[in-house]
Image (cartoon, rainbow, N blue to C red):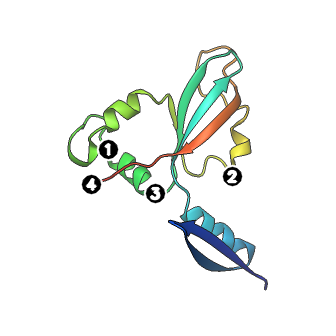
Amino acid sequence: MRWIVIAITVNKKTILFPCGGLRGARLMIEILQKSKIIHAELKNGSYYKYVWLGNDNFAKLFENWNYESNKGKYKGLLEFDEKISYYFDYDEFNNEKEIIGIDVEDGLEDAEIIDFTIENINWDIN
């Protein structure tokens, strides 16, 4: 078996994670997926924001949220949610390339995603 090493740099410090083969590397990468905001351009010229949930603290917070609370650890989540059109589950895509062509805007003509940018969600959970 070949070993694969994943190197992650945080605050100018590199951490090495040895993984047993390709399957082990995929599992390690899955463990590290952050939730992301997708800024999408649709075929009809409209722009929408979507979220691709990861398996990070933000995704756990969102999963436990009651869609109404705006206090304590949920402060700000209500306003954030109002700006998001759709939430994709963690395992809905294998990679970012699969986002092109997706249409989640029911009833909207030419709503396929034709271009997008992605940014990590860096949510401060107190």
Q: CA distance from mark 3 to mark 1?
A: 15 Å
- Asked which secondary structure carries label 2, the reply is loop
Q: Residue at x 51, y 32 (%)?
A: 86
- Asked which secondary structure carries label 1, the reply is loop
Amino acid type for the residue under numbered disc 1: Trp
Amino acid type for the residue under numbered disc 3: Asp
Residue denoted by label 4: 126
Residue 17 place in picture, x, y as percent: 61, 78
- Asked which secondary structure carries label 3, the reply is loop
Residue denoted by label 1: 65
Relative vertical location of residue 100 with respect to residue 2 in this rendering, above or below: above
- In the image shown, does 125 or 78 lie closer to the viewer? 125
Amino acid type for the residue under numbered disc 2: Asn
Q: Residue at x 51, y 47 (%)?
A: 53
In screen coordinates, is 107 left or right of 76?
right
Question: Could you classify mark 4 by the number of other residues whose Cα lies within 10 Å: few (under 14), some (14-19), or many (20 or more)?
Answer: few
In screen coordinates, is 13 left or right of 56?
right
Amino acid type for the residue under numbered disc 4: Asn
Q: Which numbered disc covers residue 56?
A: 3
**Sequence order check: which comes first, mark 4 or mark 3?**
3
- Res 24 visible: no
Residue 18 place in picture, x, y as percent: 64, 81
Q: Residue at x 50, y 28 (%)?
A: 85
- Res 118 visible: yes
In the current view of this chain or complex, which residue is farthest to the front? 12
Q: Which numbered disc covers residue 94?
A: 2
Q: CA distance from mark 4 to mark 2?
A: 31 Å
